[in-house]
Image (cartoon, rainbow, N blue to C red):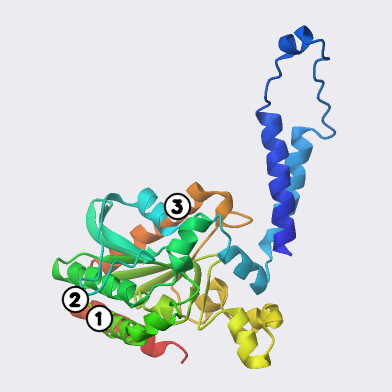
Amino acid sequence: MIKDILKEVESLDQRIDALRNPVPEDDAEKQLLGEEPTVREDCESLEELEARRTALLEQCRNLTSADRVFLARHQGRPRVDEYIRELFTDFFEQRGDRQCSDDQSIFGGIARYKGIPVTVLGHRKGSTLEENMRFRFGMPEPDGYRKALRLMKQAEKFGRPIITFIDTPGAYPGKEAEERGQGEAIARNLAEMSGLTVPIISVVTGEGSSGGALGIGVANRILMLENAVYSVLSPEGFASILWKDSSRSGEACDIMKLTAQDLLADGVVEEVIPEPLGGAQRDHKQLFASLDAALERHLTQLCKMNGKALADQRYKKYRQIGL
């Protein structure tokens, strides 16, 4: 199980780091106090520990669907604000839906990508428990989807490409969200995004579930990180509905065909972005470099198309899914 492998790898990481960066003991002070100087005896050398870590990480090459779901939800994966900070310049956040409030679980604004003005937005989960609670673990309310649509319509008005980052367990299911038109807000986004006349690229960076993901995911090109998942609902929800037993979620992962590799084979996504061995959380910089190259390549291709061609290509892409 990937969880056990990563736990052991993290332990080795700590021991390797301690050997590479030893904390000096103040032996002179200890002698003044009449104490014996500290003598460190390491049972394994740095090379042996690194070899063990490499062998463990090699086991991460053939992961099950359940393993990839675990990695997609890993707390250490990069978040939308990190992607924006590392891949874009001159970012200016835009807030509010101009109707009700500012839903902070959708984060976005205007930026530059390789000098090109773009609109960038995505689900925001947060990196700490406090942020997770404030952003509802990346589950937007109707205000969030209306904010996203406002930014995208503004992008169309000024001819800016749109790049979205998807990472959500789904739209927020609360009573107030339903009362304020959760279903209508998502449906309107689907309808409006399908006809936008600017390039749209969506990147599934973690978990993309249900209409909560699709509400900002109607795109000309869909990219997925190697260990991301994209599905109609969570494996736990699938197992609860089909077998009335959420504990069978691991079995559901295989049936649902929700991995990046499954969706690439089915023609749902255009490219799978490789992750470091063991998951994106192990080397953010390596992941950003791989994603940056893919974004530049796809955006260059899409920017050569006119508005009608972009809308037509997007329409045909979704009509062909499942054929």
x, y percent for residue 120: 30, 62
Mark seen at residue 311:
1
Residue sitting nearer the eye, 108 or 281: 108
Q: Position of residue 197 (x, y in %)?
A: 20, 76
Are there few (<14), some (14-19), or many (20+) residues within 10 Å of tag 1? many
Q: Secondary structure at mark 1?
A: helix
Which sits in the foreground, 312 or 254?
A: 254
Say which residue appears at 49% left-offset and 57% top-offset: 130
Position of 232 compared to 301: left or right? right
Q: Is residue 306 visible?
A: yes
Q: Name the side, left or right, on which 44 lies relative to 214.
A: right
* Residue pointed to by mark 3: 288
| Earlier-in-chain disc, 1 versus 3 | 3
| Residue drawn 65% across the image and 80% down it | 254
Q: Can you say which quadrant of the picture contains the N terminus? A: bottom right
| Cα–Cα span, label 2 and label 3 | 29 Å
CA distance separating discs 1 and 3? 28 Å
In this picture, is 139 found above or below 19?
below
- Amino acid of disc 1: Ala
Residue contact between numbered discs 1 and 2, judged by CB atoms under 8 Å: yes
Q: Which mark is residue 307?
A: 2
Q: Secondary structure at mark 2?
A: helix
Specify the amino acid type for callout 2. Answer: Gly
Q: Kindly tell me whether residue 292 is visible in this rendering.
A: no
Task: Decide: is 91 above or below 255.
Answer: above
Name the amino acid type tagged 3: Phe
Labels 2 and 3 touching (C-beta < 8 A): no
Mark 1–mark 2 Cα distance, whole angstroms, equals 6 Å
Position in image of residue 287 (x %, y %): 49, 53
